[in-house]
Amino acid sequence: MTFTWSLDPLVQKNLPKEVIVSVLEDIDFFRIVFVIFIILSLVYPIAHRILKRFVKNYDAIDSSAKRMVVLHHAVEAVILTVATPLFTYYMVKASLTIHDNDEDPISILADIKLDVRNIFLLCMLFITLYMYELSSRYESPRVVLIIHHLMAILDGFLVITFPTSIMLKTCSVLVYSICFEAATFAGLFMYRMYPLNKWTPRMIMSGIVIFGVTRPIQLLWVGAAAFGSWGDSYHVKWQAILQFTLTCFFTIIQVWSLTINFGIWGRSCAKINMHQANMNRKTFSRKPTDQTHHTSSSEEEGDGILDDNMDDYEDSFEEFVAFLKQPVRRTSIVVRQASFVRLASMRDLRCSMRDLRGICVDAIIEEELESEDENKADLPPLEKNQV
């Protein structure tokens, strides 16, 4: 079987209604649809177990609604990625190819029916994903998502209600465009599960680019299918207008969602930059000073401050205060011990540099007062006449 590439099937050719109805009346078609329902019903619990076992952040989510959103993003990203090459093959073959006239018409018709059936099955797969997502968003429903998914499901129902060529071509294009949301769902999943991974903002931006480029193509494709064969006898004009209007509605919502994804990309970049800055600051604070300083038994015990066990912190802190009272090269000692105190108290005590300076000043004042008392004790007692 040979065929050539052309835009004529997309723009001008229409299938008779009887061909589409024969596909929907095939019992094998409904058997495969039933198998799709069973497989998807098993995919979600299996994916939940896998994520809970191997992804720590997923198991740490305390809200069941947020966990369900992450699960949907993971399942949709995988299914759309796997289905994209298959859907692309059947869409290109059905919309952009012309069979040779020398071939047997029966074989050509059988080949067309097979392509139409496979397109229907993939459409049912994606519509089932939308149904599962709608049914699981009962805790935190979003109005825009509910409207978008309901309109998409009802548009698929129109193909069964009005099995015409224009409904098949336009609806299949709209469902096929969902394939290019795989990178978007993968980016949202990584944003929740791997927020500090350097590939997370890259995946989100790739989803934005792919999604943004394919939306105008979707609008042009549906417009060509809706108005290209306006005068054909199989062409139903009100269905063409309805499908193009729905496509404009879906495109507006999808373009608006790009602004949300762009904001998520900005927050992802900010998180990674902030984390990198904190890591650099911690690395700099751990570097030893180049100045030489006095070494004592209390300084050697200062390493214990880095221990996360807060029971040992109080003793170490008292040693640090006592060590500050020693009148030997206080500058370098304070610099080194300050980094230890800040690291040890960052989580619970939140010790600030202002408090640390106050500790230093108190130690210096106390030392000066002690030195004055010692000087007074060394002075000879005054005579009465001197008084």
Image (cartoon, helix red, strand yellow):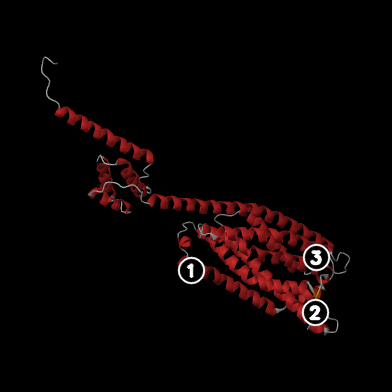
Q: Which mark is residue 3?
A: 2
- Characterize the local packing of mark 3: few (<14), some (14-19) or many (20 or more) Cα atoms within 10 angstroms: many
Q: Which mark is residue 49?
A: 1
Which structural element holds mark 3? helix
Question: In the image shown, does 355 or 145 lie closer to the viewer?
Answer: 355
Label 2 or label 1, whichever lies nearer to me, is 2
Q: How far separated are the C-alphas under marks 2 and 3?
A: 21 Å
Taking the image as shown, residue 106 lies to the left or right of residue 209, namely right
Q: Say which amino acid is labelled 3.
A: Ala
Which structural element holds mark 1? helix
Taking the image as shown, residue 116 lies to the left or right of residue 330, namely right
Tally the marks. Answer: 3
Residue under the point 78% across and 71% down: 95
Mark 2 or 1, nearer chain start: 2
Q: Which mark is residue 225?
A: 3
**x and y percentages locating residue 300 in the rendered image:** 26, 51
Mark 1 or 3, nearer chain start: 1
Question: In the image shown, does 59 or 99 lie closer to the viewer?
Answer: 99
Q: Say which amino acid is labelled 2.
A: Phe
Which structural element holds mark 2? strand
Mark 2 or 3, nearer chain start: 2
- Characterize the local packing of mark 2: few (<14), some (14-19) or many (20 or more) Cα atoms within 10 angstroms: few
Question: In the image shown, does 117 or 200 lie closer to the viewer?
Answer: 200
Taking the image as shown, residue 336 lies to the left or right of residue 218, namely left
Question: In the image shown, does 78 or 378 lie closer to the viewer?
Answer: 378
Residue under the point 32% across and 46% down: 337
Circles 2 and 1: CB atoms closer than 8 Å: no
